[in-house]
Image (cartoon, rainbow, N blue to C red):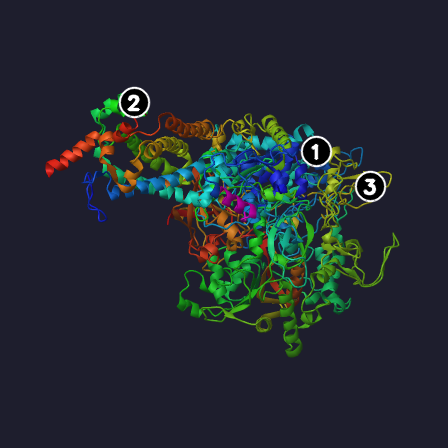
Amino acid sequence: MTNGWIDIKNTDMMLIMGGNPAENHPCGFKWAIEAKRTRNAKMIVVDPRFTRTAATSDLFLQIRAGADIAFLGGVLRYAIENNRIAKEYLVNYTNAAFIVKEGFKLPEDGLYSGFDGATQTYDRSSWNYEEGNDAGGEAPAHAAAHTAPSAAAAKSAGTTLGAAAVTPTPLPAMPPKVAYDLTLQHPRCVFQLLRQQYSRYTPEMVERITGIPKDQFLKAADLFTSVRKDGDMKKVATIMYAVGWTQHSFGTQIIRTAAILQLLLGNIGRAGGGVNALRGHSNIQGATDMGGIFDIWPGYLKVPNPTDVDLAAYLKRITPTPSKPAPWDSFNYWSNTPKFAVSYLKAMYGDAATKENDFAFDYMPKVDRNYSWTQIWDNMYRGSVKGMFAFGMNGVAIGPDSQKNIEALKKADWLVVGEIYPDETSEFWKSPGITPEEMKTINTTVYRLACAGFAEKDGSMTNSARWLQWKNVAVPPPGECRLDQDIVAQIFLKVRDLYQTQGGKFPDPILNLTWAYTNAQHPALGDLAKELNGKALADLTDPKTQVTIKRGQQLPGFAWLKDDGTTACGNWIYSGCWTEAGNQLSRRGTEDPSGQGIYQNWAWSWPANRRVLYNRASCDPSGKPYDATRKQVWWNESTQLWMGNDVPDFKPDSNPKDHMGPFIMNAEGVGRIFGPLGAFADGPFPEHYEPIESPVQNALHPNQSKNPVVKKLKTAADKYASPGDGFNIICTTYRLTEHYHYWTKNNRMNVQLVPEPFIEIPVELAAELGIKGNDKVKVTSARSYYVAKAFVTKRIKPMMIDGKKIYQIGIPIHQGYRGIQEDAGRDARTILNRLTPTVVDPNAFTPEFKGFLVKVEKA
Amino acid sequence: MELSRRTFLKGALVGGAGFSLLGFDLTPAVAQLKELKIARATETRSTCPYCAVSCGVLIYTIGDKAKNVTPQVIHVEGDPDHPINRGTLCPKGASLEQDILNPRRLLKPQVRRPGSDHWEDIAWTQAIDEIAHWVKKTRDDSFIEKDAQGRTVNRCESMAWIGGCTDTNEFNYLVVKTMRSLGLTYLENQARV
Amino acid sequence: MSQATLGIRRISGHAGPAPGDDVERDYQVCKLIDTTTCIGCKACEVACLEWNGYTFTDTVFDNSYQTMPETAWNYWNLIKFNEHEREDGSITLLMRKDQCMHCADPGCLTACPADGAIVQYTNGIVDFQQQNCIGCGYCVSGCPFDIPKFNPTTKKMFKCTLCVDRVSEGLEPACIKSCPTGCLHFGSKDDMKDLAETRAKQLRDNFGFEKAGVYDPAGVGGTGVIYVLHDVTNPEAYGGLPKDPRIPFLVRFWKGPAKWIGNLAMLGGILGVTLHYLRFGPKQVDAEKRENGGQP
Amino acid sequence: MSVSHVISSRRTGDETEGRILRYTLSERVHHWLGAFTYCYCLITGLAFWSPYMFWLAALVGGGPTARFWHPWLGLAFTLSMFWMYKMWRRDMLTTDADRRWSRVMKYYVENEDEKLPPVGRFNYGQKLFFWLMFYGVILLLISGIGLWFVESIPWSLRWLRYLAVTVHVVAALATIGGFIIHVYMGTAMVRGGFTSIIRGEVSTVWAKTHHRLWYEQITKGTSAQK
C-alpha cells in the first residue's frame, strides 16, 4: 500500500474495486467505516457481484469481470473533460509536461508503436521522452518546473512485484535533459497524449464494454472526481484494490490506470489518499521484499542476466541515471543500487566476497527468461523440473489448471512438502480419479514434513502497510513437528556436508555461504533479523556528522551502506529494523500525536519507518501542506529541513526552490503518467483488452481484441475456451470471509460457518437452467469441471455487454480433496482451480483467475 | 447449585410441615457467576497468520510459565493495544484456537515411496539425509555453468522452491539465501498468484 | 447473601421481592448494533462460541451465507442475511445480528415458573441459571423475539448471557470486542442511545437514509441491545425483527390477573366448602336422621 | 356395565347382609389411579402456577423431576379418565330427572334432600363433575402437548404457544374447582361415600336415601331376575 490501514480513516472518498475488503480484510475495513462515520466519507464499490463490502457502500456498480480498464479510462476522460484535475500537482509532480519522442503511436488499433507480431513483444525504443528544453512558453516566473512521478506501480502502489520484464535486448537510455511544456499544450506532451488516449472511452463505450448503464457510470465518475471540484485541493480520495485487479492478463495495467487517475487527482502521497493494494497473505509483502520470487533479489534489486558479464556491467544496467527537465532536481534514490547490491553479496558470502572476485557476483544464478509460477509447472510437465520444495504453498490447489499441476508432479522425481495439515499437493498421487493401478506408475518420492504453526514460531511478518511486526512463541510445536527454519537449515547444512565430502558441480557458493548463527542447526530468527538489518564490516565515519560506527555494530539505516565491501546487509529496505538500539520490530508504542493513525513508535515500517509514501507530494511546490487539518510533512524554513508527523519520504535538506520531485525512486523524480521504455511490457498507457477467454470482441478495436503480448502455453494440458464452443458464461473466483484459501477447511469452527462449497448463480440464469437453491451444479471450463451446490442469488444481475446478454457466476475457492468436509465425503472434492486458464499478466506473471468462460448445468 | 446445607434443611422442614399455601421460601436464588476463564492464564502477544492486516492477537495458555507445565492454548482474543485491529478479529482470527489446537495437525515426517499407495513414517534424520541427497543429485545432474553463448550463468533449472507467504521474513530470507546459493532460478511464492 | 445475589434485581418464579432489588447503584449495560456498518463477517458468532466454549454442530449450506436457520442452544448469536430489494429495484444485503435483547421487562423471566432460573441483574443483563431451570419451556412462550432455545438432552434452556462473566469483571462482551468494523459497541444505555441517535442522524442527513432510526422497543420497556437500522419503520425486513415486540397479551394475562383470580378461586373454593361444612354439616342417612330427631 | 374382574366376581347391586356393592374393584382401581395421577399433576401444576407454591415441586423431587413427570402422569390421568368414561358413560348421561333435580339443587346444598326428586346411580352434581373432568382433561391434553413441545411450535404459529398456556391454565382451574367440591362431598359431606369408593359397598339405607332410583332399579332388577 502507498499509505496504510489506519490512514484510510483520513479519506473523504473511497473507490473499492477489484477487491472485497469487508470479506477479505474485515479488520482493515474498520478504517473505511471509520472514515464514513467520522468524516462522512463516501464509498463507491465496483464489483462483478454485490458483496458484503457493497452492503455498506453508498454507490454500487455491477461490472463485467475483466472490463476494469474501460471503467477507469472512462473516469479519467470524465476528470479531464470536466477539469476535475489537480493542475499544480499534475504540472509539478508528474511527467504530464514531458514531451514524448516522435514515432510514438497511441493504440487506436489496439497496438502501440514497435509491435513485433512474431515474438509477440514490443520494440519499446519509441516509448521515450524527447531530449530538449522548455518547448512551450518561456519559463514561468517562479521556477515552477515539473517533476515526473515515479512509476507509482513500481515499488508500492502497483503490482505485487513491480519487476520489469526481463528483456535480453538492451534499451536506449532516457535523455538526461527532457523537453517539457509547462502549459501542457504541446501535442506530444504526456498530458495531451493521455487526453487523446482516453478520448475513446466515452460513457457510451464504457457502457458497451463494462455493462454499467451510462447514468450509473456518470454518477460514479462525478462522485469520485468531486474531490477536485473547482480545483479544491483539501479533499482526498483513496483507491483500495486486491487480486480482483491483479489476477488478469492485463492486471498491472489496471493498477496503472488507477495510479494515473490518482496522480491526475493529486491524491498520491496525501493522508487518506494513495493507491492501496490490500495484500492477501500475512507475509506476502515480506516474502516478496525478501526476494522470494525469481526476478528480484531481496530489496527489489533486479536479478542479473547473462549479458551482465561482471558486477560493473550488472550495476551499470540496473542503476538508473536522472532524466528530468533541466531546472528540476531528481533524488533518483536507485542510484545507490551498487551500495545495496554489494552489501547484499557481502551478507551472502562474507569474506569469500572480495573486490577481486567481484564480491562473488558469479556465485549468483543469472536469469534470461521467465521462470515464474506457471513456467515451473509447465517445465515440470515437460520433464525438465525434477524436484520441488513446497513449504506452506499448495501448488495443486492454486493451479491454474490444477489437473496440469497434478500431471506435472507425476513426472517429477521428488517433492518435499512442509505443511501443518494434510493438503492437496502432498497427496496429488491419490487425488480423486487416480486408480490404484495408476498409483503404482507414479514414481515421485514425496516427503511430507510436519512443520510448526504460527503460534509456535517467533520472527517478524510484514503486513500490507509495510509494517514489520515481531511475534512471540506461545506454545511448543506438537508431536515431532520442527520449526521451518530448522528444517531448511538442516537440509542445507547436509547438502553442504555432501559437497564438502563428495565434491560436485560448482560447490563454491554452497561452501562459502555465510552461516554465522549462534546455533547452526537451529538458526535463531533474531540472528537472521540482525543479518537483514546489516552491520559494519569496518569502522565507518559519517563525514557530515562525524558519527562513527564500530566494526560489527548494527547499522542505523541504509544511508550507511557502502559499495566498497565495508558493509553487509541482507535487505537494504529492511535496514534499520534491528539497530544497536535493539529489535525495532517488537516496539509497542501506542501514541499517535497527530491523530492520523501514523503510530511512529509501533513496530517498524520500511523504508526507514515511513508510514505514508511520497508524503512530500502532500505539500504544494513551496512546501506547505495542501490540507492544514491533515499535516503529514512540511518544509521548515528556519531549520532548512523537512519535518513532520511522519518520516519525510524525501531528501531531508532539499529546499523546495530546487524543485526536487517527490517520487524519489524514479529517475525522473516525478510520477509516471507515461511509463517510459522498459517500465511496462504492454504499453506506457493502459489500454482496454479483453480477457483471454471473453464472450465478446473488443469494442474499441475488434481485430486486436486481446492483450497482444500475452502468450498462451502450448502443452497438451493447456486448453483455452472461446464463446463458439458453448462456453458463454463468465466465471470469477474469490475468497470468503469465513475461510482462508485451503487452510481453514481443517478448522472445525470455520467449517461450521460455511459447511459446503457453493456456486453463486443469478436468479435469472438459474431459472433458465431449471436450477433451484442447494441443487448440485456442475461447472465446466475448457480444462476441467467443478461440482458444488447452487447458491441462487439476486446479488448478481445479468448484464448487456455490447448488445449481448451475458451472465456471470462466482465460485469461492475453498474446496479441495483433503479437509474436514472432504474427508467426511460431504462435498464433491473437486478443486476450483481445475477450471482456471494458464495465461499470465505480461508484467507480473499473475495468472488470470478472474473472468474466464464456463458452461453451467445441473450435476 | 450444590445441595447446600440450607436447601436440605428447608426441603426437610417443609416436607414435614404439610400444607402451607403461603410457604416462605428460603432457597437463595444465587446467580452462580462463571469465573473469568482467562483470569490467571499466561498471555502471549502474536500476529494472526491469515491476511495482511496483521491483527494483533493475545494467546492465552494454561500455566504461569512454571517449568512443569506444557502451555496449551485455552483462548485467543484480539490485542486491544494493536493500532490496526484494536482488539477486533474476523471469524478466522477469532477461531485461531482451533488452528493451534487441531486434531488434523501433521505430527511426524512421512514419506510416500515411488509406486506406493500409502504414507510411511520416516525419522527426521533419515528424511533430511534423503532430501539432501536428492538435492545434490538433481543439482549435479543439471547444473548449467555457461549458457549457449558461453556466458557464465551458474544456475540450476531442475529444482523449484514455492511457498512462504504466511511464514516469517527471517525464514524467507534464509530460504532465498540457501536456494540462491544452490543456483535456483525457480523461486516463487503466493505473491505471484 | 453472597455479593452476587445483591446484584440481582429480579428473579423468576420467586416468592417475594428479589434481595438485591433497588439495593445497589449500577449502570445499565447496553450493546449497540449498527446494522448499517455490519459486514456480516460472523466474527461475533465465532467470538461468542470461542469464549463460552460450547460445542460445534454440523451445519448444512442452505442457499445463503447464514450459518444456520435460527440461533440454537449452542449457538447464541447468529447473523440473519436477507437479500432485500429496495424501492428503486436495486438489491442490498441486510445483515442483522440476532441474539437475546436483554429486555428491561423480560418476557422470559415473567413467564418462568422456576425459582431463580432466570435472573435480571441490576445492570440489566438477563441471564439463565441452568441449575435452577426445570426445562418447562414457558420462557419460549414469553419471549417476543423467539430467543430461548431448548437443549433436548440436558432439558435446559440457553441464550446469550451478554458475557455476564466478562462484564462483571469489567471486560466488554466477547462479540463486541471482536467486531471488526465497530458495528457493535458497548457502554451504558445512555451513552449507546446517544451514539445511536447521532449515527442515525448522520445517516439521515449525509447518507440519504431518510428513515434511518434507533430500534429500542418500548413494548418491553426498552432493551439492553439496541439497533441502528437503515429503515426503522420496517424492522421485519431484517430477518423478522418484530415491529412492536411486547410480552404476549395472553402470557401477561396469565401471569397477571389470571394468577390472582385463580388463587382466589382456589382459596375461595376451599373456604367455601369449609364454611358449607360448618353451616350444613354432613348429610344424614334416613336412619340416623330419625335418631337425631331430624336436625340437620 | 360391570366388568367381571379376577379379584372379585361380585356384580354391583349384590346384596349381602344389608350392604350393596356400589363400585366394582376395577372401577375403584381406576378411580384411585386417576385420583393419584391428578393429585400429582395438581401439586406439580400448582408449583409451576405460582411462585408461592414452587416449594411444592421440592416436595416431589425438585423442579426438573416435577417438570419431567407432570406431563407423563397427565397422560396417565387422561388414560384413566377415558377408562372411567368407558365404564360410566351410560350412567353419566343427564336425564329429565337430573334437570328437575338441578332446578331444586338449593335443597341439596342445604341438606334437605328429601325435597329432591329421586336420584339414579349418580346425582346431577356428580354427573356435572364427571363431564367437567372429562372435557377438562381433553383440553388439558391438547394444551399440554402444546406446552410440552413448545419449542417445536414455529414462530409463525406463536399464538398457539400463548393459547396453549391459557387453555391449560383455565382448564386446570376448572378441574381444580370441581376437584375441591368432589373431595369435599366425597369425604366430609356424604358419610359412607368415601368407604364406597374404597371398599365398594354402601349400606342399603345409604343407597335408599342417596340414590333411590338406582337402589330400586338394582334391587327390583335382581329380584326380577331371580
Q: Residue D107 carries which label?
A: 2
What is the secondary structure assignment of the residue under circle 3?
Answer: loop
Q: How far apart are marks 1 and 3 (CA)?
A: 22 Å
Look at discs 1 and 3 and give the one toward the viewer.
3
- Residue A107 seen in the current view: no
Q: In this view, does D116 lie above or below C168?
A: above
Q: Which residue is drawn at 32% across and 41% down?
A: D32
Q: Distance between the residues labelled 2 and 1?
A: 111 Å
Q: How crowded is mark 1: few (under 14 residues within 10 Å), some or many (20 or more)?
A: some
**Image: magenta residue range:** B1-14
Q: Distance between the residues labelled 3 and 2?
A: 120 Å
Quadrant the N terminus of chain C occupies: top right
The quadrant holding residue D81 is top left
Quadrant the C terminus of chain C occupies: top left
- Badge 1 is on which residue? A87
Q: Residue A655 carries which label?
A: 3
- Which of these two is toward me, A615 or B74? B74
- Residue C109 seen in the current view: yes
| Mark with earlier residue (1, 3) | 1
x, y percent for residue A515: 71, 68
